[in-house]
Amino acid sequence: MPASLDALVATHADLLERAQRAAHDRTYFSAYDESPSPRVYGEGAAEAGQHAYDALLGRPFDLPGHPDDGIPAGSEVSPYGPALGVTYPHAGVDALVEAARQGLPAWQATTPQVRASVAVEILGRINARSFEMAHAVMHTSGQAFVMAFQAGGPNAQDRGLEATIYALAEQERHATSTIWEKPQGKRPPLRMVKEFTPVGRGIALVVACNTFPTWNSYPGLFASLVTGNACVVKPHPGAVLPLAISVAVAREVLAEHGFDPNLVLLATEAEGELLAADLATHPAVGIIDFTGGPAFGTWLEEHCVSKQVYTEKAGVNQVLFESTDAYRAALANLAFTLSLYSGQMCTTTQTIYLPADGVRTDEGLRTPAEFAADLSTALDGLLGDDARAAGILGALVNDDVADRLAGQPKESVVVESRPVAVPEWPDARVRTPLVHLADPTDRPSWTAECFGPVSFLVPLPREQMTDVFEQVTREKGSLTAGVYSIDEAFIGGVRAAALRACVALSENLTGGVFVNQTAAFSDFHATGGNPAANASYADGQFVAGRFRVVGIRRHAPEPAAVEGR
Amino acid sequence: MPASLDALVATHADLLERAQRAAHDRTYFSAYDESPSPRVYGEGAAEAGQHAYDALLGRPFDLPGHPDDGIPAGSEVSPYGPALGVTYPHAGVDALVEAARQGLPAWQATTPQVRASVAVEILGRINARSFEMAHAVMHTSGQAFVMAFQAGGPNAQDRGLEATIYALAEQERHATSTIWEKPQGKRPPLRMVKEFTPVGRGIALVVACNTFPTWNSYPGLFASLVTGNACVVKPHPGAVLPLAISVAVAREVLAEHGFDPNLVLLATEAEGELLAADLATHPAVGIIDFTGGPAFGTWLEEHCVSKQVYTEKAGVNQVLFESTDAYRAALANLAFTLSLYSGQMCTTTQTIYLPADGVRTDEGLRTPAEFAADLSTALDGLLGDDARAAGILGALVNDDVADRLAGQPKESVVVESRPVAVPEWPDARVRTPLVHLADPTDRPSWTAECFGPVSFLVPLPREQMTDVFEQVTREKGSLTAGVYSIDEAFIGGVRAAALRACVALSENLTGGVFVNQTAAFSDFHATGGNPAANASYADGQFVAGRFRVVGIRRHAPEPAAVEGR
């Protein structure tokens, strides 16, 4: 191994080990600080990041050595208004596959430790560009700046590291060589020399989404890379820049350490192209990570059966609000969940079940209508100030979400949505959440995924709430679930249903933790066990299929005679 | 936990730990002795097993408490001649699913350690019935008695234990609970109590094959059981008895330890039923393990995309015989591989590439025709004595195999097949292997799977052998590969091709290890990385998708005040 790789492994060994321990213990761990404070990232880091971002705008993005057929690609427009004006290298499927292949032999021939260390080096350099990344994520996803910094920067980097350590541990699960010696009674033992080599599946495709371009793609990207695969990153056309930066850093680190930079490629779509489907079905592509809508996710699952397909789709996330002894705090918690990034997180609660005969609270029994009014008050309290509201809501990612919000039926609305002005960005598409008090018999209305800031209060007979929650999770899928109750028996029933339907559950959240947020190394994102997703960030299943172990064996040389034997 | 379960865990803890260590180290390990010697299994064990087997014949198989609709099922006929006359309980899909469901809550609520200990208890009791099992395997698969004892008994049990320890380790990969404490600068930290529960997918289906009813089904059966699933075992109609015995033992152990015996069910097919497909597509079935032909295996992969589907299909296993310095020993090794169980192992070599200009050997250069004659001599030496031949060849599992053998085109045959008489079983269907010297340009003839005792010598330009091997592996799939060469550069090229095409490789086998045999805890059976199989016995991927982890979290109570703080 070249000296530079030895040094790289030594540099990152401690972090990899600490992260592995945390992932086992499920305790709090973060390698990349989520505070955008100058005390953490240095004086001037924020300004430098802003300048770096500004310098990217209105020009071709530089990816030296990347395949490029010259067809223009790139038409991002910020949800805050301006067009980014960035164009990207474009290449067809065959050119991408051919380029990705070149570096594979050397990448597969090195050790898992080296690949993991390269991954950590990439993550560290991405981390150093977190302010620049924050602007790129903000102006593609619509996330407000601080959220874009955290979720698009350090939190995403932590998820990338998490995938890295799972990928490393899985490859280190078996000895790489052994002498196998089988006793044969009085005859000499059978002796074999065996070698075991983890081999990647070849080329991995990562199909990213518009809302969390980095957070939802780093797990697959780093898991595939560390298990010895080349990665083609196919961004959503609306959120290319954050991944272009990520790919640029990865290529720079690979090249510096003697690997082919084309092991990580950017597949930018030209107008009218269907690059994801064409790449996914190419025989050289062995792994697909997809984040996005259930329609294409299911298509991939059905059409790529001979490949490893990991899908994060969507579902209907539910909260059962049965009772509480901390009504104000519970409402505040829920209001924040519904408001954060305008409900555009795949983990945001959409449907809230209430006992039809009222919610028992420390402020008395509240009928569903009263609960709706109280939630409205909580939302007003949170979002009453436009500047603060904008910092929580961010902007709607695209016109589809705005149109869906505008097209909601009026009759059942109990909390109206309103536009929020952002002086700095006059064209920003910012709206507060809308809440329906749904007709419980109109089940299709509240069990269809409605992406964006729309949620449904659903009064149900108390004894039916848990069953409905379980059914909807099984049928539609859920990434998160919550329950509020002072009745341990009720909570016990919901827990059992959550286990059966395979969805993570948050109980009685009233403080600074929200049902739609997960922490890397501790909370699994999705279970992979209901229709919302077939995999989890991150566990053994997320990495184990990305490589296979090939055994090579031969007779061992005769052992040297041992004296006295 | 009841005291009896504590005791069970304590009893088997050491074995589980030793097996886990061996699986990591890949050293020789076996929990169940493959020697059918009275010194191992006790005086009289062979006779008792024979009597136990005889007592099963000609009557209904007793599975107390098993769903049974009274429709007769069971029509096994021994490849050695006699009909077994055993009938089995029969139940439809819904009855099986409903029965399997009942015990799931208690089975999922117990710990992975308990489930693994129950599995080891089952395996131990199956081991004690190894002689009885040997007869059952012999008279369903056609394996000769000693092989039936070993492969159907202890070797299968070892593979079951291997799956058990992978399933256990995967579930123990994360803490079951934690206190998560996130610093918040000067504010008090966020503190959450979190619990993590492995949850099985529900009902697992094991679709077994005719040739290795236990060896190929125990991995899936025990992996699914230990990860908290109920298992429906669907035997091949020609090989029910070995699995009926296995299921009976599992049910007995489950019931003794307070679990529902219907957690393990036998799905015997009635005349004209398509039980495997109907069970596989039932929504309650979440896992499918299949061993058998590529057609139905691929159908399952394509029609059960929302389930975990593990398939062991078939392929074209190849040996590259480039050169050797131990010609006699190499030929003997190869002859044994081709003869063992009449080539009816999914791991048997089918196609042998030879340099067209001759094989360099320590007995001089041998042309392909000379090599064929030498192989014929080696086969004659091995199989010249009928009694010895019968003990190696076993019987052809069914008439299809015999018909395919009889229908081979005559022109290219260089080693003829002949029937072998077995005085004890006059109707036994026993044949020696047939070998073609194939036309290298007639590629379809030697790249189509030809199940049974038929193989092909294919002369190729030396420099094409490795490429052809890689192509055929990628296209048709292979479970095993072998190479003979004294040229390290040639071997290096074959190794690289084996890694790329993802197939295990045996180099220069001349002694008592054969390319078609693998050892549990050391050799992976199949890689899961080429079309012959999508999974391996056993690794993390084989177990990780059989359960999912569900996290449940809530705010932690305030920590007790610490003095002096």
Image (spheres, coloured by chain):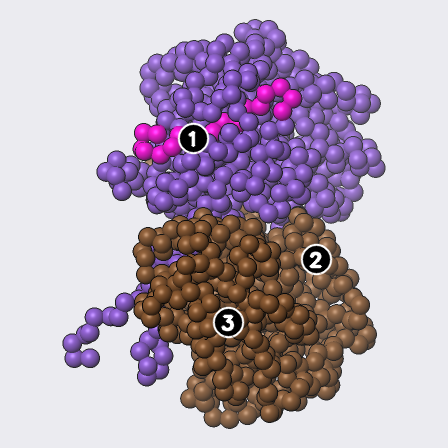
Chain colours: A purple, B brown
Q: Residue at x 55, y 92 (%)?
A: B47
At mark 2, the secondary structure is helix
Looking at the picture, which amino acid does disc 1 mark?
Answer: Asn
Can you say whether A511 is above or below A423 in the image?
Answer: below
Measure the C-alpha gap from mark 3 to mark 2. Answer: 34 Å
Q: Residue A426: where, in percent of width, then height?
A: 59, 6
Report the residue marked by disc 1: A262
Closer to us: B528 or B1: B528
**Would you say residue A268 sits in the magenta stretch?**
yes
Same chain for mark 3 and mark 2? The answer is yes
Looking at the picture, which amino acid does disc 3 mark?
Answer: Leu
At mark 3, the secondary structure is helix
Can you say whether A88 is above or below B407 in the image?
Answer: above
The circle on residue B280 is 2
Q: Residue A503: where, in percent of width, then height?
A: 62, 44
Q: Residue at x 59, y 88 (%)?
A: B422
- Tell me where the magenta segment starts and ends, as one range: A255-273
Closer to us: B118 or B488: B488
At mark 1, the secondary structure is helix
Work out whether residue B163 can be spotted: no
Whichever of labels 3 and 2 marks the residue nearer the N terminus, that label is 2
Neighbor class of circle 3 (other Cα within 10 Å; few <14, some 14-19, many 20+) is many
Looking at the picture, which amino acid does disc 2 mark?
Answer: Ala
Q: Label 2 lies in what chain?
A: B
Report the residue marked by disc 3: B338
| Number of numbered labels in the structure image | 3
Q: Label 1 lies in what chain?
A: A
Q: Quadrant of the N terminus of chain A?
A: top left
**Would you say residue B11 sits in the magenta stretch?**
no
Closer to us: A109 or B131: A109
On screen, residue B246 versus residue A3, left or right, reads right
